[in-house]
């Protein structure tokens, strides 16, 4: 978890192009996109494994 926090902090610093509102908005969008991507990958990995096992059970029952 600490690595993820460090990565998001680095992304925030890297995307902070200016001290104005535009840079802040860009940083917030970048962090949201990164978080959504991480959650999507984790969800699809978990669901993919579950779906695979269910389909395997169905195939062996047939």
Image (cartoon, rainbow, N blue to C red):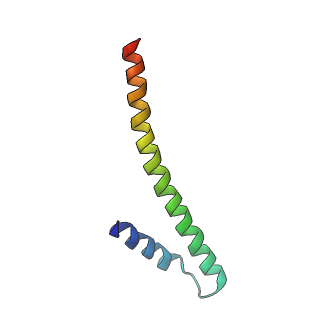
Looking at the image, which residue sits at the far left?
2
State how many labels appear: 0
Q: Is residue 24 left or right of residue 59?
A: right
Q: Position of residue 13 (x, y in %)?
A: 48, 79
Q: Residue at x 38, y 73 (%)?
A: 6
Residue at coordinates 45% horizontally, 71% vertically from top-left? 8
Residue depicted at 66% across the width and 80% down the height: 22
Image quarter of residue 5:
bottom left
From this viewpoint, which residue is outermost toward the top? Answer: 62
Residue 50, image x and y in percent?
41, 35
Q: Nearer the viewer, residue 57 or 41?
A: 57
Task: Using residue 43 as the reference point, say whether residue 20 is left or right of it.
Answer: right
| Image height of 35 relative to 6, above or below | above
Looking at the rendered image, the quarter that the C terminus falls into is top left
- Camera-side residue: 11 or 32? 32
The residue lying at 39 percent from left, 66 percent from top is 4
| Left or right for 27, reference 2 | right
Residue 52 lies, in percent from the top left, at 41, 30
Residue furthest to the bottom in view is: 19
Q: Is residue 3 above or below residue 45?
A: below
Place of residue 29 in the rendered image (x, y in percent of width and height, measured from the top left): 59, 69
- Name the quarter where the N terminus is drawn: bottom left
Q: Is residue 41 above or below residue 21?
A: above
């Amino acid at each position: 978890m600490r690595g993820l926090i460090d990565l998001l902090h680095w992304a925030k610093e890297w995307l902070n192009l200016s001290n104005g509102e535009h840079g802040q908005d860009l940083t917030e969008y970048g962090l949201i996109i990164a978080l959504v991507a991480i959650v999507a990958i984790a969800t699809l990995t978990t669901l993919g494994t579950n779906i695979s096992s269910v389909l395997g059970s169905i195939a062996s029952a047939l």
